[in-house]
Image: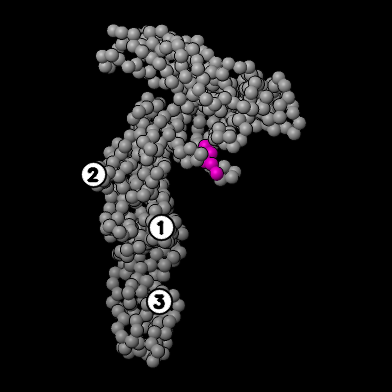
Amino acid sequence: ASGGIFEADHVGSLFRLEPTDFKEVPIWVGNATAAVGDLMRFDGNIYELSAGDNTGVNPPTHTDGAVRTDGSKPTEWTFVSTEVGIVQITEVTTSNSAEADVLETLPQPLIDGPTYRWSEGAWSPKYGYPAKIENYEQRLFAARTPTDPRTLWASTQGLLTDFEPSSEADGSFAYAIEGNSSKNRIEWLQFGRRGIYIGALGEVHRGFSAQAGEAIGPLTFDTELVATDGVNAASPILPYGDPVYITADKARTNEVRFSFEQDGSRPIELSLPSQHLGAVGFEQIVWQSAPHRQAWLRRTDGTLAVMIHDPEQDVLGWATVPIAGGFVEDMDITKSATGAFDILTLVVRREIGGVTVRMVEELATNFPALIGAEPITHANHAFASLVFEPEVETDSFTLGHLVGETVYAWTDKGDFGPFTVGAGGTVTVPEPVGRAVIGMVDGTHFFETLDLTAAGREGDTRGIKRRLHSKLGLQVYQTVAGTVCTVERSFGMPDRIGQEQEILPRGVAQDVRDPASGTASLSLPSGHADQVHVRVKPQGLAPLTVTAIITTIEEAGP
């Protein structure tokens, strides 16, 4: 080369070389005199006459080996190369000299003379490699190198490793996303039912075919601006064919939906009903499709939030999930051993005996026990737990990973605890059991209703004190134990929390194999307050499922 082209980090780079001209390699013409060894071009390829003295009546079109092209003449053409050569640099000796492996045969004019028609590969040690990839329409899409942070590359359709530029409908192509700043890099790619979605720091685009009924290709690819709030680096989820992603501020969760009224896509904020949950920031989102359709979000403070989402049924709900003092560092969805359920798998950082440890924990699937497919004794609501099924009933168990921690036990004889795990990791329950789930309990876990609304004689009752009548109906299912109380809130005053009452007033270990389902009638009066809530808490590891709360609340007048 000349001009100091090569640098040390060019090793591994691809160079595409094309001759300046083809004066010495004419285009094939039919039935013309030729000699063995003559080179000719046809349809982007170069061929050498390897037999005969005539070009023949049929042009060569093969891309490998030798082919006889004329049945009446001995004309034989051997494929030599395309009109473009590709090499990969293996060593840089000087700024103008390098050694390379030939990946695509160099056309003869490149060997005979120099050329200025050369280009470097977009991916290399010098320019970096794509950070994001996705499959869509039998193409591998790659995006964001350090030098091209807003460029998208698509492979040849059906050939996921072929990225050589092409103008064919199924060929490879590159596309630079419009933007005002090169720092506005692409953060993720996600296929969807209406295209491939491109999430960047400052906006979201949808890539699609501009020709209805045609696949994406070099001549049809187009983009549409979907959202301008930007995205977090966390990969989105695709619960119903439309991406759900965390925004750049980490405080919101949006779903991209297609609007027939606007004839385009737009973002819908799913976190709007519970914006306070994103105040600490969302770091990651995964989707669990079975046994229930729900999204799990890892928060900056190490806790979890769960979102129940079904747009067809107009269902959207949010809740927080504490982790018994642990800090979730990563999570993923894996399949259960039978493949029937999706399992939420967590990497949880904990302080055990003054030492920082990391545990891989799976969120237990309690659905079979809830619907009666398994005994209720198989329910598992413990954290960092172990499940024991000894051949002979015993009262002694070993939890070496929780030495010094407070644990509870849910067994076929009932709910026991709390216990402190001994120095050797041993835990002794009050009586021998044939099955036990032993682990930590999060004492902060409870759920609370929104402000109970009272019907007013004169309309809106906000600002008017109300009270809860003594009788409260609590509809439960497969429930063993739990408590309920009132929470009264008045403007400028601290919360008044009522006395907790047992939902099922019975002793521990009674009727464990036959949990209660139905409506419990409780006496739970409240005083007068601006707001009245009902709070329900589990007891230890005993199963608790509430399906409805029936209250009678009235205004207390102006």
Whichever of callouts 1 and 3 sits on the residue coming sooner in the sequence is: 3
Mark whose residue sits in front, 2 or 3? 2
Q: Is residue 539 above or below residue 147?
A: above
Q: Is residue 97 above or below residue 295?
A: below
Name the amino acid, label 1. Gln
Task: Read off the residue under disc 3.
Answer: 62
Provide the residue designation for mark 2. Answer: 262
Q: Which one is in front, 358 or 533?
A: 533
The residue type indicated by label 3 comes to His
Amino acid type indicated by mark 2: Gln
- Judging from the image, what secondary structure is the residue with disc 2 in? loop
Residue 504 percent across, percent down from the top left: 56, 18
- Quote the CA–CA distance across marks 2 and 3: 49 Å
Image side of residue 467 versus residue 182, left or right = right
- Give the residue pinned by disc 1: 138
Region rendered in magenta: 340-344
